[in-house]
């Protein structure tokens, strides 16, 4: 399967997706927060927080996996995006979030995976720049991870979907 067939994008709420794993844009405590993190914890129920407490946090750029509990998704992969500062490290750190999430997904035999736009909300990463990094990092990693069949980028508005589609179209 080519990357073009494996990658798609939609506008919607990531918590509603029936995929093997959804990715959470978390913070280093892994103890919940606002944005997509808050939505995921609300939909998954309190057992998710209980499992997260046992993980002891997660450094920025890395990823951890838990069960999905009351979510339709079987797993949640929690990754911690960089807080945008304009520093040289921002781009490679965001890229690492996508690569590490994909690796954990493959290790856990996930074939379908949904990503939110990591770091583009509270963490302030410019959306277009983040989208280019998300797409390039995912395409590169999918070359190696042949068991992953479907990646869905979930944008939270139609406007963001249009912007993302333009970049995805230009990357194919
Ligand atoms: N489904 C899909 N996308 C969503 C949803 C949803 N249900 N809700 C929000 N988004 P953010 P960050 C979009 O702020 O920038 C949290 O408090 C949102 O519009 O959730 O990585 C954590 O605990 C935006 O485009 O994550 C951290 O402290 C994108 O998801 C901090 O925020 C990411 O926005 C992480 O900040």
Image (spheres, rainbow, N blue to C red):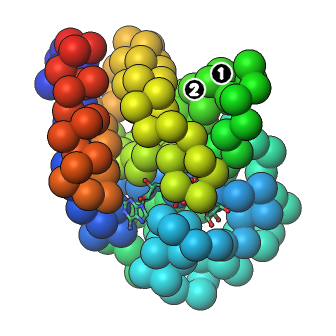
Q: Is residue 40 visible?
A: yes
The image's mark for residue 152 is none
Q: Is residue 103 visible?
A: no
Residue at 35% over, 48% down: 114
Residue 105 horizontal side relative to residue 168, left or right: right
Residue 87 horizontal side relative to residue 172, left or right: right
Residue at 27% over, 24% down: 167
Q: Is residue 140 above or below residue 49?
A: above
Do labels 1 and 2 touch, CB within 8 Å? yes
Ligand 1 within 8 Å, label 1 CB: no
- Closer to the camera, 55 or 172? 172
User: Residue 52 appears at what percent x and percent y?
Assistant: 70, 69
Q: How many marks?
A: 2
Q: Which residue is mark 2?
A: 95
Which image quarter: residue 3? Answer: top left
Q: Is residue 150 above or below residue 95?
A: below
- Closer to the camera, 102 or 31? 31
User: Residue 164 appears at what percent x and percent y?
Assistant: 27, 35
Give how far apart the Cα atoms at labels 1 and 2 are.
5 Å
- Circle 2 SS class: helix
**Quadrant of the rendering where the C terminus is positioned:** top left
Residue 55 horizontal side relative to residue 1, left or right: right
Q: Which residue is mark 1?
A: 92
């Amino acid at each position: 399967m080519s990357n073009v067939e494996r990658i798609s994008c939609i506008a919607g709420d990531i918590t509603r997706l029936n995929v093997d794993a959804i990715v959470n844009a978390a913070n280093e405590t892994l103890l919940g927060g606002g944005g997509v993190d808050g939505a995921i914890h609300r939909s998954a129920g309190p057992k998710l927080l209980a499992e997260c407490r046992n993980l002891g946090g997660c450094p920025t750029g890395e990823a951890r996996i838990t069960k999905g509990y009351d979510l339709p998704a079987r797993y949640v992969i929690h990754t911690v995006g960089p807080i945008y500062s304009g520093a040289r490290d921002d781009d490679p750190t965001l890229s690492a979030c996508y690569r590490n999430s994909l690796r954990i997904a493959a290790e856990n035999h996930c074939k379908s995976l949904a990503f939110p736009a990591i770091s583009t909300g509270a963490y302030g990463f410019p959306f277009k720049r983040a989208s280019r990094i998300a797409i390039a990092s995912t395409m590169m990693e999918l070359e190696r991870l042949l068991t992953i069949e479907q990646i869905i980028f979930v944008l939270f508005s139609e406007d963001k979907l249009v912007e993302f589609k333009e970049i995805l179209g230009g990357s194919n």
